[in-house]
Amino acid sequence: MLPFKVQTLDTKLVGRWYERRSVVKKIISLPFMVTVLVALTAGGIVSLLADENPFKVYSILFSGSFGSIEAIGYTLFYATPFIFTGLAVAIPYRVGLFNIGAEGQLYFAAIALAAMAFYFPSAGIFSFFLAIAAAILGGALFAALPGIFKAYRGSHEVITTIMLNFVAMSLSNYLILYAWKDPGSQRPETIIFSESTWIPLLHLGDSPLNYSFILALISAVSCWFFLEKTDLGFQLRAVGQNPSASKVAGFSVKKCIVLSMMIGGAMASGVAMNEILGNAHRLRDGFSQGYGFIGIAVAFLGRGNPIGIIFSAIFFGALYRGAGELEIETHRMTRDFATVMQAIFIAAVGCEGLVALLLNKLKKKKGDPK
Amino acid sequence: MSSLILEAKGITKRFGNVVANDRVDLSIREGEIHAIIGENGAGKSTLMKILYGMIAPDEGQLLVRGKSVHFESPLDALSLGIGMVHQHFMLVERMTVLENFILGSEPTINGIVDEKSALQDLKNLMLEAHTELPSSSLVKFLSVGQQQRLEILKLLYRKSDILIFDEPTGVLTPQEVDQFLKSLRDLKARGKTILLITHKLNEVMAVADQVTVMRAGKTVSSLAASSTDVKELATLLVGREVRAFDERKVKSVKKLSGAPVLKVESLSGVKKLKSVSFQINPGEILGIAGIEGNGQHELVQMLSGVKVHSHSQGASIQFLNMKIDQWNVEKRKAAGMACIPEDRHHEGLILDFNLVENFYLGSRVHFDIPTLLPFKEVTALVEKSISDFEIKAKSPFSKARELSGGNQQKVIVARELFGRPKLLIAAQPTRGVDIGAIERIHDELLKRAEEGMAILLISSELDEILSLSDRVLVIRNGEISAEFSDVAVQGPDLRYEIGRAMV
């Protein structure tokens, strides 16, 4: 209850506008643009070294990823796991934690999901929800472990999440190779799961893009809403910015640490849904091509902002899809160019502070004091 | 003796539309202690950064020993013998005293650091400066006062003879302040010129020869310390008449009625606090005096609920007749407790959050449905606070970082008082805050006490304790070492008795 009547003032609108503008400005700032330009130039030099015209390379990359409905479908399909793992890294990061364990979390979610699909295949729509719920819970609980270690024992989350990656991946390997192996297949994979558990396609050309992408978008927007508009999200952000002030304000730092990790793990589980229920319909060895680690780059390129992550994930998705085309259309370049570009962008984004500094110096020389 | 060693003529510095320094003139005579005083945002820091070569002025001229100079970087200033001790020390905590001492100008033999001669230099300088520091101990194990002495030694080692001190006493204990002022006089006796930037007018009067007052980016006046007094300086500083700091505002003893708001019995902590007991009545201001680090921080933490474990038998905290020992922070706040934490940057605010978020941070328990953030209401509250407390901020959405210390503190005070608490724990409520803000905060505390709010005032500023408290406890080594009642009646004589109980 407020002790007096709340008055609305005109300045509020101005303030809102200013705040919003500053968020947009933060993402599309001058240093950011320069950074992107530098990265593209560096990528161009790499293609020159490979004896290919950089403009041709970039135009193939672009048309390969956005040139047709089907290309867009593939781009978004590749972007889907990146959104999920980007969020898996970003949410704990807002609390000051560095979650290197998205890979392990998505593997553990996949195990939980596959277990449900494997053992309860014929419950119709329930199998589907059972599998989804198991994935989310599996990812969240597996991520809760390093959170609890951190909050109550002080173990550094980078170490524990990396170690747990091996646990989840080895467990998944074991299950795929022995317990759940499809006897009729030569490859390390489980049987095809019941059709009732499949996530329907979005039918963008022949692309495997499915409703997981929509789920990814909803997840990102929900994460944004959670962080910016809810009390609990506020607590997480406060703890991330200043744990001691948060303690004085009465927030439980421990709770926020564990919670943020659980949300991160739940986000990582989306990869399992996309790859297993949406695409392969079975658990395959190596179904994640390091998505959990690429999520770190996605999160940083997206500035840890859930909405920014959507865009950076689509950018990464386009790179992966476009590089595939590159392999077909050029003589000397392979899909590895995506990895090269990814590395360049990570390095460039890491240097963004430096770019801002240099820009400032340049401005100063021109005589502008600020 | 009285030749001008450092002059600034018509210095102007703009940041965007803000004029930080507006045609500032400054003349420093060789061998004097020259104090530069001004409220936060008056342009002192900008001027110092210009004198030290960290930023270049847009207009104006700097003269060192009569010669016009142009600084590209602090190194240029250093080469002309101008050195600065920053408010936040520039020491590497994980390196030893000796390593810090020579850092950046290491004596070398064939490219290898000559530790022997460095140590000898350090010893010689320590002897000259009548100070003693353990040369091989890590800087992080030094006290704040020792670190400051190391900073001075560093400057002497670099042959600086104009020493600039930025707010040097803000972090020191009273004894350390005395020692520091003494060392300033020592330095002066050795022919050094000293620039002292400070808020504390008493210290200015104690050591300075000349005082330059800055206000709103301009030098308002420059006068000899011997021909002025604290009251005149305070008036010049603020631009209107203010009460001198130690002038007692409430002369009468209040009638205290009703059951005690807070009753603490044999409360002990893990670190310092040992069996502390006291009680506060409604409308009473209970001052806790003492040198910092004697258990005050732990006391605040245990009362506000940040730490809940008590380690002594029979310990209890009763708030409005409720036993609250095991209550968490939120429950205590909801019941009517509020707290101004001693360190506003680390405990009071989140600097990268805006004012609305920072207001909500501490007043959260007073809102009904904390599922979604009630930022519409909070924004209106912040706007009200901005006008009520004359907080200088562009908008409620300005980041806390963008505000000056005094304005940041006012945000905290407004926030903590918003829920109409029955008890306010105010730890160092005016530390590092300009006179105008101190006055505003003190007035508000007194007004709320008149209305019946109990205040536990924890401060290492004896002046502040004496001018506000009805009753004073002295804390030493975690224990209450003395109690003084009827502070208003006894007045200034009490100062010395309290001081004795502190050590």
Image (cartoon, helix red, strand yellow):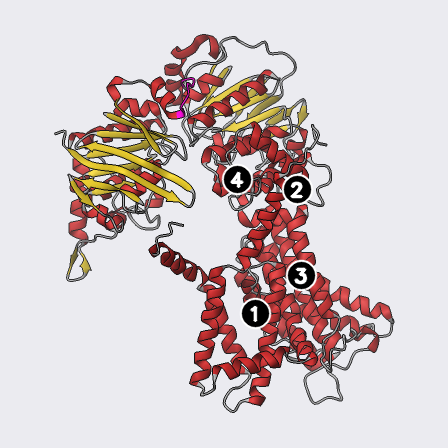
Helix or strand or loop: what does disc 3 sit on? Answer: helix
Helix or strand or loop: what does disc 4 sit on? Answer: loop
Q: Which mark is residue B394?
A: 4
Host chain of mark 4: B
Q: Is A321 situated left or right of B252 in this image?
A: right
What amino acid is found at the position of numbered circle 2 in the picture? Phe
Task: Say few, some or many: other residues with alpha carbon within 10 Å of mark 2 (under 14 / 14 to 19 / 20 or more).
Answer: some
Is residue B356 visible to us here? yes
Q: Which residue is drawn at 28% across and 22% down?
A: B206
Q: How far is disc 4 from disc 1 in space, using C-alphas?
A: 41 Å
- Which is nearer the eye, B327 or B161? B161
Above or below for A237 versus B310? below
For the record, the magenta segment spans B238-244
Q: How far is disc 2 from disc 4 in space, using C-alphas?
A: 18 Å
Above or below for B27 versus B102? above
Host chain of mark 1: A
Q: Which of marks 4 and 3 is in front?
A: 4
Task: Determine whether label 4 and label 1 are within 8 Å by CB.
Answer: no
- Which is nearer the eye, B198 or B92? B198
Magenta segment: does it hold B340? no
| Mark sitting earlier along the chain (2/4) | 2
Q: Percent position (x, y) of residue B499?
A: 38, 19
Above or below for B37 versus B259? below
Q: Residue A293 carries which label?
A: 1
Host chain of mark 3: A
Q: Is B173 situated left or right of B298 in this image?
A: left
Return the residue at label 3: A220
> Which residue of the protein is positioned furthest toward the bottom in this rendering?
A331
> Which residue of the protein is positioned furthest toward the left in this rendering?
B1
Quadrant where the C terminus of chain B sits is: top left
Same chain for the residues at labels 1 and 3, yes or no?
A: yes
Task: Determine whether label 2 and label 3 are within 8 Å by CB.
Answer: no
